[in-house]
Image (tube, rainbow, N blue to C red):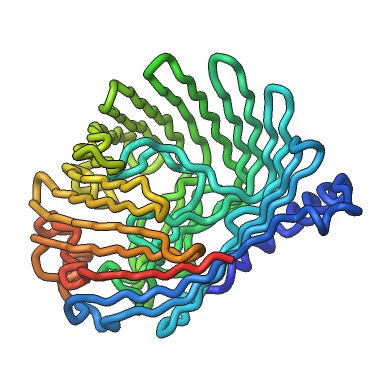
Amino acid sequence: MERVFINIDFYRYINLRISVFTSILFGILPIETLAQDIHFGWEIAGQTQVFAKTASYGQENYNLSLRAQAELYYEWNDGMDSIEFIPWFMVAHKNKESTHGDIQELAWVHVGDDWELRSGIRKEFWGVTEGVHLVDIINQSDLSRGLDGEEKLGQPMVNLSLVRDWSIIDFFILIGHRKRIFPSEFDRPRSTFIVAGQGEKYESSQSNRNIDAAIRWQVSIDDWELALSHFNGTSREPSFIGLNSSNELLTRYPEINQTGLEVQYIAGDWLWKLESIVRSGQGEQYIAAAGGFEYTQVGLFDTNTDLGWIIEYNFDDRGFDAPHTSERDFIFGARWVMNDAANSQALLVASIDDHTGEQFWSLEMERRFFDSCFINIEMAIFANTGAAPTLEESYNLLASGDGGDDRKLSAFYKDSYLKIEIVRYF
């Protein structure tokens, strides 16, 4: 289960493609002006995470980590061509398996009159709702850095974007599949079972070398913003197919088709949102949706402060069989933005399961201090989850096929935490 920097097996496969890409790229770059025109910056961040209670499965009561990230940007041809390179690496103090890194961006972008071609390793985000991002399927999630799936791995791709007066159409060729990174045995929080770091299965005969494809059409009409997308290829979300000899969960990545819809409607201080997908190939065809609104009080009490109120509902027609915790959840939130020079803001979100009553509360705050430092504070509270099951109880439930009382957050019963990160930009 040891993690290796930027997933060596995967990058051996795409090494030839990167070599060809860089050969072509540096063949057209004006090398004589390259050095003085490169924009380079980097950041270093220290993070501490402290838990309120002793862990259910023997992990430590605190985590310490150090992260470094660099960003290189260069443009030429009057801004019609550019390249961006963003790598990062994180060292965990007590857990070697959490020491890892990734290339977030290594892409060349060429801009035409009414089109753009983006080639290389990139991150592409789709979605409009706050609670979950159902349609966001291009990049793989790194769950070892956060259970919400917001931390993503870079994806090798070729993306052609056709820009028209009435809409934008994006075509994606996605080169190879990256397996999901799950929390290791010593990570916290984590589920009762450890997910095996090796031995994953693929439905595709090409294994992780499969070529996936996607298309997305987006349009703005008055106060409406709409997007339709379709993905065909290997699912970023694995299915679990049993235990190996070490009692670790084994994963299988099926071939899927997913059609997605995104809608936003702006009506004054109101922002209405909807995401919906239809997916086939991963078990029976199913439908999932998330929707709601955000109402913003602009200039609260005649100040520069804005306060937004968020209400959403998440639905997945697989119910308890859905491999996540957002199958029947209400989302309540508040977004506070000071609009000051220090970029002070906070987001409070509560997710409540309308069937089990389980609750997850999160608070995220950030503020700049001095000229080049940021402090990020995150607090998470798991409530009404029921006691965490023992490993023996979990094995018995898995063997019997009994789903228990439908509580999916019980493994995190004692995992409420406070996380503080200090970031220094250079």
Q: Which corner quadrant of the image does residue 110 belong to?
A: top right
**Residue 210 drawn at (x, y percent):** 60, 47
Q: Is residue 369 above or below residue 296?
A: below
**Residue 107 drawn at (x, y percent):** 68, 48
**Residue 120 in view, yes or no:** yes
Q: Nearer the viewer, residue 392 or 307?
A: 307
**Residue 106 drawn at (x, y percent):** 67, 53
**Residue 309 in view, yes or no:** no
Q: Nearer the viewer, residue 212 or 162?
A: 162
Q: Which corner quadrant of the image does residue 41 belong to?
A: bottom right
Q: Is residue 142 above or below residue 63?
A: above
What residue is rendered at 55% in x and 48% in y?
Answer: 123
Residue 357 left/right relative to 61: left
**Residue positioned most to the front:** 302
What residue is rendered at 27% in x and 27% in y?
Answer: 269
Q: Nearer the viewer, residue 360 or 196?
A: 360
Residue 113 left/right relative to 24: left
**Residue positioned most to the right:** 32
